[in-house]
Image (spheres, rainbow, N blue to C red):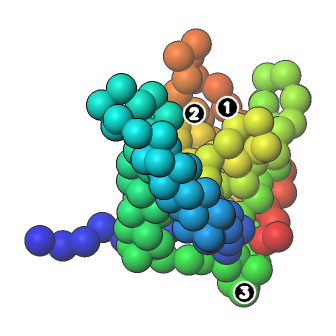
Amino acid sequence: MSITKYPMTVQGARALEEELHHLSKVERPRLSQAIGEARELGDLKENAEYHAAREEQGMVEARIRDIEGRMQNAVIIDVTTIPHTGKVIFGSTVEIANVETDESVTYQIVGEDEADIKSGKISVGSPIARALIAKEEGDVVAVKTPSGVIEYEIVEVKHI
């Protein structure tokens, strides 16, 4: 059985590490204390505080395991250390312009866990990213969308 490795930016890895630290150093002790206090209240069968704290503890522990697993299987890519060639690669920030409307938008191509369209981060597996990868500044790419095919020109590729 081969283990799948997932690309991740340095920022994405840092965010996961910060979340892991918060969950294990802040949430875990808080929940442990809440469970202890709820136990002192007596009968556990009818103790809502105890059951709520145990349920939350289960979710926190599951998220900790999830993050640890993702970090073990992450390939952290620092795009700033890769020579700039004008080619779109994982981690690069790409300005594209709609050929028809001339509207431009900028996206950073990131790992699946890091994608956040509101902050301009798109998953490497998204249709736009798949169309852009390995293309160069000046190239025109066709992206299939639910409303049809849209052509974009790659205006600029940055490694930031």
- Please identify the quadrant where the C terminus is shown: bottom right
Res. 137 visible in picture = no
Query: Separation of disc 1 and disc 2 at Cα?
Result: 6 Å
Give the image location of residue 59, x and y in percent: 43, 46
Residue at the image point whose x is 40% and y is 39% from the top: 42
* Mark 3 or mark 1, earlier in chain: 3
**Which residue in the structure is indicated by mark 3?**
81
Q: Nearer the viewer, mark 2 or mark 3?
A: 3
Res. 102 visible in picture = yes
Q: Nearer the viewer, residue 18 or 52?
A: 52
Q: Nearer the viewer, residue 84 or 15?
A: 15
Residue at the image point whose x is 55% and y is 23% from the top: 145
* Mark 1 or mark 2, earlier in chain: 2
Say which element carries label 1: strand
Amino acid marked by disc 3 = Thr
Amino acid marked by disc 2 = Val
- Please identify the quadrant where the N terminus is shown: bottom left
| 27 on left or right of 53 | right
* Label 3 Cα neighbours within 10 Å, binned few <14 / some 14-19 / many ≥20: few
Amino acid marked by disc 1 = Glu
**Which residue in the structure is indicated by mark 1?**
151
**Which residue in the structure is indicated by mark 2?**
143
